[in-house]
Image (spheres, grey):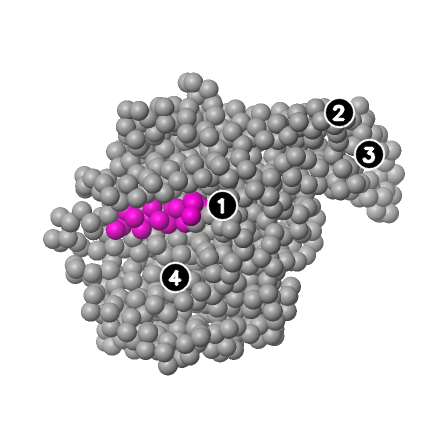
Amino acid sequence: MNGLLFLGVSVGAAVVALLLRPVRGAALAVGLLGLAIALLVASGIEPGAGIRVGDVALVGTAYARLVLVLATAAALVTFVIGWADDEPPSYGPASLAVLGAVGAALLVDDPIVGLLLVLAAGIVGILVVLGGEGASATAIGSTVRALRAVVVAGALTIGAAAWLARPLGALALEPAVFGVAYLGMAGAVALRSGVVPFHLWFVRLADSAPAAALPVFAVWVPVALTVVVLNWVDQAIAPILVPLETERAVVAVVGLASLLLGALAAWLADDHLHLAVYVTVAEAGLALLGLTVLDPAVWQPLRSWLVAVAVVQTGLFGWVAAVRVTTGSRRVADAGRALAEGRPVGRLLGLALAGVALGAVGLPGWSIWAARERIAELAVGPAGPGEAALAILPYLALLRPVVAGLRGRAAGGAARVDRSAGRGMGIRGGGIEWRGRGIEWRGRVARHGTPRAMVAAIRSGRFARTVEGEWRRNRALVATLGALLLAVLAVASSAGWLGLDEAAAGGPPSAAEGELLGNGLEGTP
Amino acid sequence: MTAVLAVAAGGAVLAGAVVAVSSRDPRTATVGLLAALLGIVFVADPLPAPPALAVRLVAGILAGYVLWVVVRERPVPTAGSALAWPTEAVLAVAGALVGWASHGLGAPGRGPEVASAVGVGLVVLAAAPVALGGRDAVRVGIGLTLLLAGATSLRVGLAGTPGPAEQIVLGGLTAGLGAAVALLIRGASTVRGVEGARGVQGAAGPDPGRGGAAVRGHDPLDPGGDATAP
């Protein structure tokens, strides 16, 4: 029941916020409130409880609940970071709509309908990317590329699913028949995730889209697609017990190439947004490697790893956006200088980066560590744990800003970010000052303290100007705290403190196990 | 009766699709696309249940309408087909014949032959706009809409008429894709005028508009801007 409510809240709030788009403040408020309510509703999804909608059922699972809670929380925080980054307000409601479609895809008991819903999420995500009025010609070109990737991937999934949905008859004895469907589905995941060599649309998109909005479109939707494809593989391919060695080898080569080349490109990128993009591309390669395992044993580790990595990548994009708000630059070197300056916001950014790195790599015994080892072991054999180290290669690039900062400190002593280019105010003034700003902010509100003075201030617009001014002054700090929050979330997910492993071990949504409500909402256990 | 309707609808779909991919006037192309989107709903045997049929029809009308709203007032010429409509028509018919002949692809299909024929025909017509359309928002958008319609028609031919829930999701997809394409066309025409809509002079470089210029340093996996790569 809460699954349907989640869908209703997210899509309803998205529609209201889009209608209110001309009034920026109202659209932001509805987007924020909608995400907060959606988060509450997602946390109330009951595993096993469901509702029948036509010929399918929306059935809650612990895994879907955890994914939706994490995705919505991540979207909420990135929305605030994007707000601090002066991004258009329309991407909040668009994120809500995407999350609604993702939620429906994870809750529906029919993988084919789930695949269509993921496609819908991708198409709605174009609204996230376009970001409302004023998109540039480059943004339009990038979005055309992205839409092409989304729809072609969707067409591949529709074709592959239909291929095996017909009565196969004697063809059921031909492994190649299943190989074609498997390749189609893996190709769709590769295309939609931006795996090398299908990564260009993603790189171009990152140059145009709000950095804080990218995770919803380019991380969580591909994760949902991979999860639904895994459901489909589990139902349509794995039970057939055909080895599909050639097909799996092709997919493995693409996945491995993406992992290595993405890691290399992330290391060489001078632009920290591109660094984050290539880390995502590299990790998508590992997800593809996971799909080469047709053994049911990969079910839990792959599902667990996908979510943990999605939270980590969201944290990385949040960090990138926060650095951009703080320094006004996308250069890795400038990010390094911000870290090396030793000012409070820089220290917090460093802490957030460390948290993301810790979440990405994990520690022995953590959920992400065990999942990565298990996936590698199942994909490449007993030597797997050694190969699991390959999966953390992309995150070596996170050392780049640190190295750049240390180098800048060694070379220039008091090297500082060019504040004249900065959009944010956060690193100006040092720690005492930002703490002082907090006190000052409270003082300013207190100045309107009496009810009469408050009313007068609101009427004259002085109160709004005060709040607006304080917001602008502190937005770098807000963005940095958001990045820090995402880093904490990444560590908690990777460590398994949120019950990720138990949730991932559960089965797909199944109407047979659910306590379903009919269309008339009458209980029919 | 349903079979006859399906064949007639299939013919209308392919004719509309040929107009949509060939025309250099986006308004004419939109009318052709609308015909294809409405006709494709009837290329099924059995037909979807009336509520599902209504949802698909409304979705098709909505997709066509939002496109029409955008193109009727804005000068958004599109390159159209380099092959001209007779060649596109021949390609569509050839694709349809291949689809009809290979219906079921080695196994008995659950849907009618005409669905496979229309599916292959639409995919053939969509291939060039999708693969070679560059940043021409109108052409790529029409190509993608036809590609999605073709894939769903192939699905009908292979696996039969989808259930009500899938029909509703397909309707949402059609309307959503129409809205996304309309937004793209509007953005292209607003930002760069005629040239922006055609995309031929769209800047290939990074967008400096969002939070500072992109850094074009070492990026071994990015060969630079090109008009056609996905």
Magenta span of residues: A180-197
Q: Secondary structure at mark 3?
A: helix
The answer to which image quadrant residue A136 occupies is bottom right
> Relative to A108, does residue B10 appear above or below in the rendering?
below
Q: Is residue B50 visible?
A: no
Q: Nearer the viewer, residue B62 or A255?
A: A255
User: Could you tell me if residue A318 is visible in this image?
Assistant: yes
* SS class, disc 2: loop
Q: Which residue is mark 4?
A: B148
Mark 3–mark 1 Cα distance, whole angstroms, equals: 51 Å
**Position in image of residue A100 (x %, y %):** 48, 46
> Which is more foreground, mark 3 or mark 1?
1
- Most extreme residue toward the top is A364
Residue B89: give x, y in percent of width and height: 35, 78
In the picture of the structure, the residue carrying the numbered disc 2 is A413
Q: Position of residue A446 (x, y in %)?
A: 84, 31
Nearer the observer, disc 2 or disc 3? 2
CA gap between label 2 and label 3 equals 40 Å
| Chain containing the residue with disc 3 | A
Which residue was labeled with disc 1?
A: B221
Chain identity of mark 2: A
Residue occupying the point 52% across, 37% down: A266
